[in-house]
Amino acid sequence: CHAHGPAPGVTRGAGWHLRWSLLHLQVLAYNRHTYETVAQRLIITVIPAPGGHPPYQGEFLVGNRNVEELLPAAAREMFLQAAAGVWERDDLSVTNVTSALDRGGRVPLPIEGRKEGVYVTVGSPGPFSPCLVAATSPQSRLRCSRGQQPLASCYDTFAPRFAVRWCNLTLLQVRSSPTAPGPVWGPGVLEEGGDFQAPTEVPPRDLLPGYLVTLLVPLAVAALLCLLLGHLMCCRREGL
């Protein structure tokens, strides 16, 4: 789905994982320069992909972009073209775009050229390329912990348009969940062509004993307490 803000310069974004639904969403945004706030109510129809979620997904952190810069379809298409070079596949799709601020990132300083960063998740029905696997290997993680670049045997096709931080690359293989069973009809649902059979009558219960116990037991306890209190107040005065 595409959500377009009401004015240029507004920032806020989120990634959704929803099934078929009609979503009523109120978007609150602010202008980076004037801090003017605006609100707009959107009605979004979310339709799942025909083939479900891609089984192979890679999450890239783009450090030189803000989230609103990757929401337009043209920007996502350019990102997919760049990702196809390192994934070595053309059947890629963007499944999630999330601001780095929503993932614990810091607000950038108000200096020209500083961006908040964007997490972009790309999915594919095919496996990862050897280049991506090498970039997330234990050896690459060790190099990243030392402040070095990970191992990569391919050319960075994202540069210079997208500054991908390769040490934050995450590869995930999603397993398809089994289909939930359909509803099971109970005995109260009529079959086609059947006649309604009223349930058998339940014999009436005798509620009088329970009623008497509920009523008489508290009354007996209250009477005993009154007799005891009267005895203490009347018969035990002045030593009598």
Image (cartoon, rainbow, N blue to C red):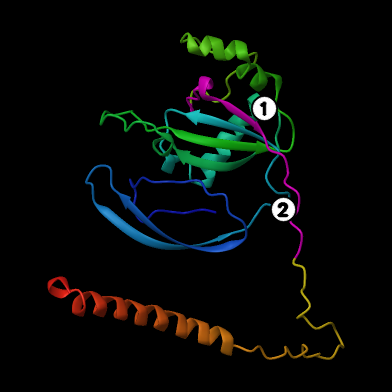
Q: In the figure, 24 relative to 191: above or below?
A: above
Question: Residue 50 got which mark?
Answer: 2
| Side (left or right) of 123 relative to 45 | right
| Side (left or right) of 86 relative to 213 | right
The residue under the point 53% across, 21% down is 166
Amino acid type for the residue under numbered disc 2: Pro
Of the two numbered discs 2 and 1 on the same chain, state the one appearing first in sequence: 2
Amino acid type for the residue under numbered disc 1: Trp
Q: In the figure, 162 relative to 71: above or below?
A: above
Count residues near mark 2 (Cα–Cα under 10 Å), then give few for <14, some for 14-19, many for 20+.
Answer: few
Q: Is residue 175 magenta?
A: yes
The residue under the point 77% across, 73% down is 185
Specify start and end residues of the magenta stretch as a single range.
161-182
Displayed quadrant of residue 140: top right
Q: Is residue 12 magenta?
A: no
Quarter of the figure with the N terminus:
bottom right
